[in-house]
Amino acid sequence: MAKVLIAPSILSADFARLGEEVRAIEAAGADLVHVDVMDGHFVPNITIGPMVVKALKPHATIPLDVHLMITPVDPFVDAYVEAGAGIITFHPEAGPHPHRTIQTIRKAGAKAGMSLNPGTPIAAIEALIEDLDLVLVMSVNPGFGGQKFIDTQLRKIEVLRKRIDATGRDIILEVDGGVTAANAAQVISAGATALVAGTAVFGDGPEKYAANIARLRGA
């Protein structure tokens, strides 16, 4: 089995020292920096914009994995890619033409991903899977960190694993929401190849980041 990627979510980091936090998780073995962008409209919270992503980029040599929980998406793609996003993931509900959004992301120079909320069926992205570099399964309702994993999403991960394998492409299957060392084995067994974790990485302070990341990957 390929190495499981660990993408700590900076939503759970110390916002007063984000640059240091990004350097710390990279040194601790993180593979991606997961950046949750929320607009207070598509989801009930507001987080960060392109200027913060641009400020973070010099602190990371690993890719910035930017999850846009916003609507509309297309007008902001260039700004996030110019700021340093290596991957941009969006939701099918965010705009009327998801395929055009994928094209916009690719044209800007980033990899393209789509995300499924707990209540969003796989059918919402079925016709576009072969055009994607990443599929993100939300195992909580997006908007806030620290929520409990929704177990019914394990079946969705399993079905997506089979659908992705059928494409023959190396598409990352990422899971975000309530992922901990206690359930990571189930998530990986279901077919995930990347784990987003906030509290499970950042919750115990910088001296524990390496151990927390290793524990998730070792599951």
Image: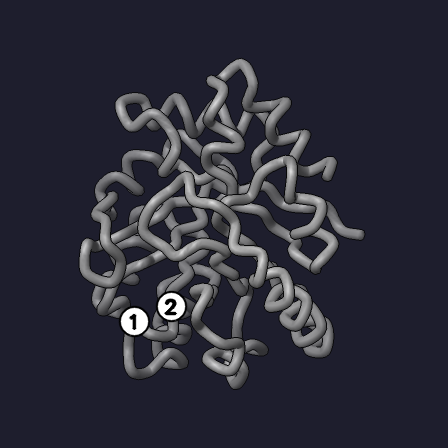
Q: Looking at the image, do the residues carrying marks 2 and 1 touch, with CB atoms under 8 Å apart?
A: yes
Return the residue found at the far right. Answer: 1
What residue is drawn where x is 52% and y is 55%? 150
Question: In the displayed structure, does residue 38 sit left or right of residue 65?
Answer: left
Count of residue discs: 2
Question: In the displayed structure, does residue 112 sit left or right of residue 41?
Answer: right
What residue is drawn where x is 71% and y is 45%? 185
Above or below, 206 against 148 in this view is: above
Kind of residue at badge 2:
His
Quick one: quadrant of the C terminus? top right
Q: Nearer the viewer, residue 18 or 40?
A: 40
- Find residue 146 and report its horizontal and vertical position in percent: 41, 39
What residue is drawn where x is 57% and y is 35%? 30
Q: CA distance from mark 2 to mark 1?
A: 5 Å
Above or below, 204 against 52 in this view is: above
Return the residue found at the far bottom. Answer: 127
Above or below, 24 against 188 in this view is: above
Q: Which residue is mark 1?
A: 94
Kind of residue at badge 1:
Ala
Query: Which dot marks residue 91?
Result: 2
Above or below, 183 against 106 in this view is: above
